[in-house]
Image (tube, rainbow, N blue to C red):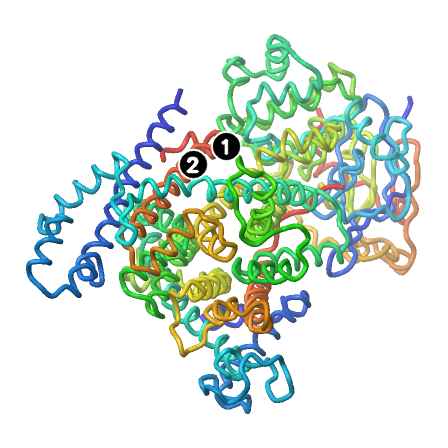
Amino acid sequence: MPILGFIGARIGVALFTMFVVSLIVFIAMHLLPGGFEQIILGPIQTQATRDAITNEFGLDAPIAEQFVKWAIAVLHGDFGVSMITRTPVAAELVRRAPATLQLAAMSIFTTLVVGLPLGIASGIGDTRRSVRVGARLLGALGASTPDFVLGTILVYVFSVWALGLTVGGYAPFLENPIANLRAMALPTLTLSVPGIALVLRTTRESVLNVMTSGHITTAVSRGESPSQIVRRHILRNASLPILTVTTMYLGALMGGSVIVETLFTIPGIGLYTWNALNNRDYQVTESAVLIFSILLVAVNMCVDIAYALLDPRIQGRRS
Amino acid sequence: MSEFVVASDLAIEYRTPRGAVRALDGADLRVAAGASMGLVGESGSGKTTLGMAMGRLLPSNARRVAGSLSVGSQSLFDLDDDGVASLRRRQLGFVFQNPMSALNPTARIGKQIGWALERKANQREIHERLQQVGLRDVPRVAHAYPHELSGGMAQRVVIAMAIARRPRLLVADEPTASLDASVRGQILELIKSLQREIGATLILLSHELSMVARTCDVVGVMYGGRVVEAGPASIVFNAPLHPYTQALLKAAPGAERPGERLTAIPGMPPVLIAASVGCSFAARCHLADETCRRTRPEVRHLPDRQVACHHIEAASPRGGAGALDPS
Amino acid sequence: MDAGRNSILSQCSKAMRADPLMAIAAGVLALLLCVGVLGPLLPIGDPTAIGIGPRLAPPSPAFPLGSDELGRSFLPRVVGGILVTFQVAATAVLLTGALGAVIGLIAAYYRGRVDTIVARLADALFAFPAIILGLMTASILGPGDLSVIVVIVAATLPLFIRVVRSVALSIASREFVTAAEVAGASPVRIMAMHMLPNLMGALIIQFTYALSLGMLIESGLSFLGLGTQPPYPSLGSLLQLGATYLAIAPWLVFAPGVTLALTILAINLLGDGLRHAIDPLPGRALK
């Protein structure tokens, strides 16, 4: 089946991209001014100490060799050691991953569950002008408010009127579900609002686009019921732009997690990264950037494949 | 003979940001059951609106402002949404101009035929339907996606879907316009033979007189949102009474003698923003006088046809030179 | 080419008349910009003058937006903040626009492998979230305006390339380009004289979206401390400072927050309106 070849090609491209990305991250961190070497070695005066450190981090080896060593270590799950805390980065990342993943999952879920139906409904329905303009305004507002602005406002609002939700006070879900949800509600809300606005707008436009295409007219002329039309024609045909937008949103989520975890004191990868950056802990920053990038490439690859599965016209073309 | 489609002084407007546009301005039409009628007219004459109105397939900014339309004794504009859907499902079949945009690009042909049949159809039945419209290598077609077919093949699929439930009324809106010249004849033949086979009434919309003459028993000529002349094709084309019909025939290529010039009709068709005062063809008609400009011509039902003109006695039928052979 | 420019302008004004929301947005934007540009000249106070008033005072006639933790009047700081955020974003986006247009035109003109490579690279670049890019850039170049500009350019370049590419590709295949080629015009001439004017509409629309994205990025990075450094105010860094005093001086957060949101909203609405005017949705749905 040609689809298998397509998937294989996509995976190959993704792996290659990941390699290129890791190369770029490594080079950026190590070679350019202000990078690894200068920061570590710069302030050190005595030659002996410099030599010791150079040896410890293997900085005198040729760059290619450094890269290979680093790449191999990474593939084995060894992300080095935090320069501040002297603990393995990998272990810390694993410890903090659940919080970030939960935040991401809840945000995506909320975004899609709220945004998709609203978008479809507003695309299909015949709405009055005032409702349309209102929705447009709200959607634009949701998309224009930066997450840190919304987050900060939410922090303020909910510190004055608690409503049972907390800022901070995170506990792992399995230990204390109530406390967990109370702490995660606001960050999820902050991250979801721009997502909902984006998904709603894209879904609506995509549905409108499909609605005006010829095969909907044909379906109507056959007397198909509205639910049949949505199921058979609209969902599959309108889903492509929605997929694109979800990918964009996932990318924004990764960046947003840094901001939101900081604001709401959620001990996830984002907060870890931000602390590391402020403390000039390069090992951690580099690892975090690498992880995010790899994830992104993987997600993009999955979306590409999903695209091809949904729209048979794409399979026919050479990628 | 019972009349299956009856339009009575039907007027339909579209609301656009720049004001209302009147697509139909009092259209009268009667089509007998089982007949094949061709509706002829330039773009903007209202024929598409009339054809689509028979299934109430009008865009959301369309409004019926006067008159009535009934299909199979059901008054279209009085039905509720379920009633219309039911009518479409059981009695109507539509074939549109562009087959590629009429088919869902993400579903295989076989599946789409299944949709048209409205029940779980097995593979054999789907293949039969595809064979019925003259497609060969049916298993491959059933498994294919629309973009893998040629225009002609796709249109055959659309036709198969339209007649799947043996509709009583088949409306074809310029079904060959986007097809190669070589397959046009075949598609028309197919539509005609299928119509006869299921005993449906056919309404063919076209701007090509020759196509209508070849395919249809009855013809209706539309101008300015009205049916200006309608009757059996042989009579209307050989002895047209309405000046517009006469002018159309003179302007149509096909039967002129070598060296003879085609006479184009001077001027442009009107875009109506309200009910027309007087006859909408008056501006381009060589017989026009004050009556024509001031008073709307009523539809006159003569023994052999209907005409809407003040001067049918004066207009001597100039059949001969422009007549098309409707055989 | 004069006819081209005229029609863009007339299209814009026609759009404004038809869509009041967009006109309001444009008005708000113009107002904000004027205030920002004229800021230093307006009698609203000095954004960097420390200690001229009580610390963390709520809004009052003397201090229309209250005062911050160093006793500075907040109003001029917010005004300065708008200006800085906008300046940085606009500079970056202008750069990106020029760069993106050039790259896109080259890709569309030469087509083939050049085009595929450019498209792939653009997609890869676009996939990177801005904050992550910001982290990387800041750790290399150090925090500051330059870092932010680099990130904005990287984040918005794919947008421009994509748009320019698709419009140019559709133009490239039209006859008048072929005619010019046959007549022996050089590639640069063809690109400049024939392709560019037709792109103007699409470019302007992309411009507004890129601008709003740029402002989002700038303020986001400033919020994290990676952008504009003190004492120059940026809406993002003002928010960050204000966040620490949230409980006792909420105006320090609301003022820059609301201003930021409104500005970006205005830009987005403007872009939306322009897009609907120049490229409305096709067809109409059935009842």
The residue tagged 1 is A311
Question: Foreground residue, A207 or A178?
Answer: A178
CB under 8 Å between discs 1 and 2: no
Residue C276, image x, y percentages: 60, 58
- Say which amino acid is labelled 1: Asp
The amino acid type of the residue labelled 2 equals Asp
Q: Give percent across and percent down for residue A267.
A: 45, 48
Tell me how far mark 1 sits from mark 2, CA to CA: 11 Å
Task: Identify the element where label 1 is drawn.
Answer: loop
Which of C212/A67 is in front? Answer: A67
Q: Residue A50 carries which label?
A: none
Label 1 environment density (alpha carbons within 10 Å; few <14, some 14–19, many ≥20): some
Q: Can residue C179 be spotted in the picture?
A: no
Q: Which residue is drawn at 18% across and 61% down?
A: A38
Determine the chain carrying the residue at label 1: A
Which residue carries the number 2 mark? A304
Image quadrant assignment for residue B241:
top right
- In the picture shown, does residue A125 fall above or below B85? below
